[in-house]
Amino acid sequence: MLKEVFNLEEGAVTLEYPVTLSAESYQDLSDYLELFLRKAKRRAEKGDEEAAH
């Protein structure tokens, strides 16, 4: 397994994944990460809106 840690102001984001991926698994991961980022964006925008009120 490989592990990547991204430190953000709010805390660490950790991603663990297999050393080798098939092309199909890579695509599945890519699709999931896109979905994750869309959800994270909505939460961030909602937090910004709540902070503005």
Image (cartoon, helix red, strand yellow):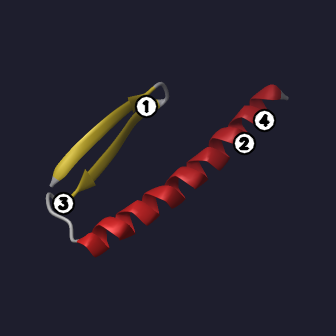
Residue under numbered circle 2: 46
Tell me the amino acid under the disc marked 3.
Answer: Pro
Q: Outermost residue toward the right?
A: 53
- Mark 3 lies on a secondary structure that is loop
Residue at mark 3 to residue at mark 4: CA–CA distance: 37 Å
Q: Which residue is mark 4?
A: 49
Q: Residues within 10 Å of mark 4 (few under 14, many from 20)?
A: few
Measured as percent of width and height from the top left, residue 45 is found at: 70, 40
Question: Disc 4 vs disc 1: Cβ atoms closer than 8 Å?
Answer: no
Give the position of the N terminus as an image quadrant: bottom left
Give the residue at mark 1: 11
Mark 3 vs mark 2, CA separation in Å: 33 Å
Image coordinates of residue 2 in percent, x first then y, are 17, 50
Give the residue type at disc 2.
Lys
> Pointers 3 and 4 in contact (CB under 8 A)?
no
**Quadrant housing the C terminus:** top right
Q: Position of residue 7 (x, y in %)?
A: 37, 29
Residue 42, compared with residue 24, is above or below; it is above
Asked whether the residues under the numbered discs 2 and 4 touch, taking CB atoms below 8 Å apart as contact, a structural biologist would say yes
Mark 3 — residue? 18
Task: Identify which amino acid the numbered label 1 is placed on.
Answer: Gly
Q: Which one is in front in this view, the residue at disc 3 or the one at disc 4?
A: 3
Query: Circles 1 and 3: CB distance less than 8 Å?
Result: no
Q: CA distance from mark 1 to mark 3?
A: 24 Å
In the rendered image, residue 25, in percent from the top left (x then y), is placed at 29, 71
